[in-house]
Image (spheres, rainbow, N blue to C red):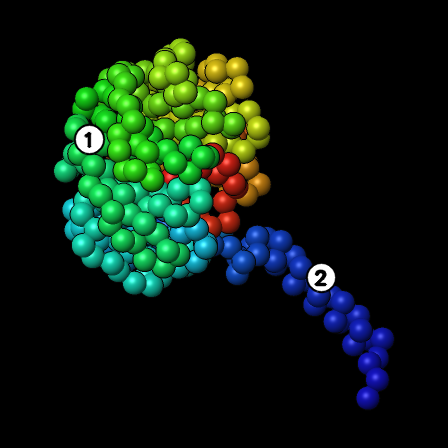
Amino acid sequence: MPFSIVSIARIGALAASLCGILAITGFANAADNVIVLDSSQAQLTLIDEVTHKVIGTESTGKEPHHLMITPDGKSLIVANSVSNSLMFLDPHTGKVQRTVGDIEDPYQLGFSPDRKWFVTAALRMDRVDIYRYDGTSMALVKHIPLARTPSHMTFASDNRTVFVTLQNSGELAAIDLPTQTVLWRMPVGTQPAGLWMTPGDRYLLVGMTGEDDVTVVDWHKQQIVKKIHAGRGAHNFRNLDDGKHVAVSNRVDSTISIIDYTTLTHVADITGLMPGPDDMELTPDKRYLWVGFRFASHVGIIDLTTRKLIDTIAVGRSPHGIFFDNRAPVVSPNPD
């Protein structure tokens, strides 16, 4: 039976109405859940990325601090440092896929760019552990003692070198992956933490949690190039994917500084934040920066066009790692 003009009009009206609903909801069905690690509560919190509402929690091991997407993008690894285990999650929903035990003290973790090496920083045990990775499983190759308190890491694009900060000895260390040997150690300042490699592997930026600056290291020469003023408790980085800027969270000042990594200068601060900004994640449109506030048990969302905090969401105690799969590219081969 053919459609009448009235039926066609009704279908058109229904389609217009549906388009309006989808525009308002932001295509919620296509969005990911935001995964937040509540490190002092042995759980993760799931947040609807569109509505900013908490939709559930999931138990983890003790002290889940950092997380990392697998090279194939099929799993998100959560490192339970005190429980000595890794949890594999669906990166879109946060649903637990499996748990792997006997990974001692995985505080920080990362894959080499060529996907052949998996590295963990065992902060409590003062060592770095090197594993071979075959695309599915990790096989321990060597424990490398590195006192004191190895913390954050990043890799050189040559797939040979991993750099690790040693918080309590104030040093930066370089490890050769094929031989599992320490190439060098150098002093960089008080309580170095987050690491970010500038494009082209030219410089390493080091967040100085015990100071108020970022140390710039020419790692090829093992020399400090300069100190860039940021804020007290400069801690971790998130590339803003604009070819020029990286954000650094200042945990003590409760600010986020914007650094121009092409000129190695501090260009702006985001203020009016909650206490203890730490890990950050960037939306695919590069407009919104999600931030975990370690000392406030909240996650916040910053509009980068206005540099204002526009929303906060209560989560568990000491939120640390934060992730959503449809994020802006990280660019630098840093772990999350």
- Distance of label 2 from label 1 (alpha carbons): 62 Å
Whole-percent x and y of residue 181?
26, 33
Query: Residue 9 or 236: which is nearer the viewer?
Result: 236
Where residue 19 sits in the image (x, y, percent)?
67, 59
Answer left or right for 224 relative to 258: left
Q: Crowding at label 2, few (<14), some or many (≥20) Cα neighbours within 10 Å?
A: few
Determine the residue positioned at 43% across, 58% down.
Answer: 74
- Residue identifier under label 1: 146
Q: Is residue 32 left or right of residue 335?
A: right
Residue under label 2, please give it: 16
Q: Residue at x 22, y 43 (%)?
A: 142
User: The residue under label 2 is which amino acid type?
Assistant: Ala
Asked if residue 17 is positioned above or below residue 73 in the image, the reply reads below
Discs 2/1, front: 1
Q: Position of residue 261 (x, y in %)?
A: 50, 21
Residue count near mark 1 (Cα–Cα under 10 Å), binned few <14, some 14–19, many ≥20: many
